[in-house]
Image (cartoon, rainbow, N blue to C red):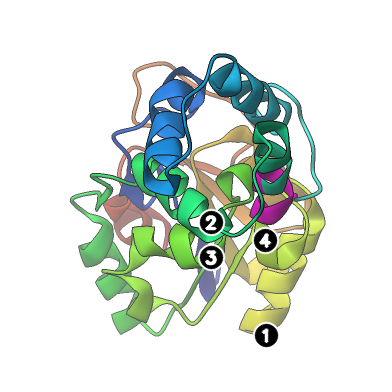
């Protein structure tokens, strides 16, 4: 097998988050921060109204492949709160910033990217945005390692979420490499299904004890195995 490029999911693949995969349990605290930073009174029912809107856009509850912008979501919340859109950017910074606290790379992320880059392997990322998160927030997760990547897209760029083929197509075209020569690495079923369906080689990062079979070509516990066992 001759791999010319490697694409990565970001969250829970390259970086680890203090927050869980589902943000729902933390809606109240995150929304209180939004209200505080925007100087909005926390009146009865406002939290519940906003939480119900967020739940509607929670892809772990309501599956969708098309992406929705952050402005769409937060304008709906502000409409429910009877607010104008003047502080929309402050609200988004407060909300997304709440969940991005204490994000850090896995121990072997930098060494793996460095090793792949030194071999002349092209590097890229394809990541789904939580609640339409703008790139200015989402890409803060990889500030430390952004310089390693030749190309990269989020679902906001693509307009669709994985496993829709559009993002994988854009990644392949940006690399200038056919899918069969691209390894895609992720931690969720949609990463594996999307990569496989587009003809890429797939690797599942499974750090847990249970065996997972989603059709992946490789299963790895650590990113360092990409260099040691696959390429």
Give the side of residue 108 with respect to residue 19, left or right: left
For residue 135, the mark is 3
Cα–Cα span, label 1 and label 2: 41 Å
Looking at the image, is 43 positioned above or below residue 3? above
- Asked if marks 1 and 2 touch (Cβ < 8 Å), the reply is no
- Asked if marks 2 and 4 touch (Cβ < 8 Å), the reply is no
Which image quadrant: the N terminus? bottom right
Whichever of callouts 3 and 4 sits on the residue coming sooner in the sequence is 3
In front: 81, or 71? Answer: 81
- Check disc 1: other Cα within 10 Å, few if <14, some if 14-19, many if 20+: few
Q: Position of residue 186 (x, y in %)?
A: 51, 46
Cα–Cα span, label 1 and label 4: 21 Å
Kindly identify the residue that appears in the image at 75 percent across and 58 percent down.
199
Which element carries disc 4, helix, strand or loop? Answer: helix
Q: Nearer the viewer, mark 2 or mark 3?
A: 2
- Asked if marks 2 and 3 touch (Cβ < 8 Å), the reply is no
Q: Which residues are magenta?
A: 68-74
């Amino acid at each position: 097998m001759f791999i010319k490029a490697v694409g990565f999911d970001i969250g829970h693949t390259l970086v680890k988050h203090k927050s869980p995969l589902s943000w729902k349990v933390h809606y109240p605290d995150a929304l209180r921060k939004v209200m505080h930073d925007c100087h909005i009174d926390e009146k009865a029912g406002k939290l519940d109204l906003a939480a119900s809107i967020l739940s509607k856009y929670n892809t772990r509850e309501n599956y969708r492949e098309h992406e929705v912008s952050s402005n769409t979501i937060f304008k709906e919340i502000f409409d429910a709160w009877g607010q104008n859109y003047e502080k929309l950017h402050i609200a988004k910074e407060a909300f997304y910033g709440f969940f991005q606290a204490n994000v850090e790379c896995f121990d072997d992320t930098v060494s793996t990217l460095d090793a792949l880059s030194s071999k002349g392997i092209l590097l890229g990322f394809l990541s789904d945005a939580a609640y339409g998160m703008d790139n200015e927030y989402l890409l803060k997760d990889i500030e430390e390692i952004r310089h390693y990547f030749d190309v990269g897209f989020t679902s906001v760029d693509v307009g669709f979420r994985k496993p829709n083929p559009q993002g994988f197509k854009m990644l392949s075209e940006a690399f200038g490499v056919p899918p069969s020569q691209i390894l895609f690495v992720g931690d969720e079923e949609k990463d594996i299904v999307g990569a496989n369906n587009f003809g890429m080689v797939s690797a599942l990062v499974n750090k847990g004890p249970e065996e997972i079979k989603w059709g992946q070509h490789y299963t790895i516990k650590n990113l360092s195995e990409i260099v040691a066992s696959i390429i």
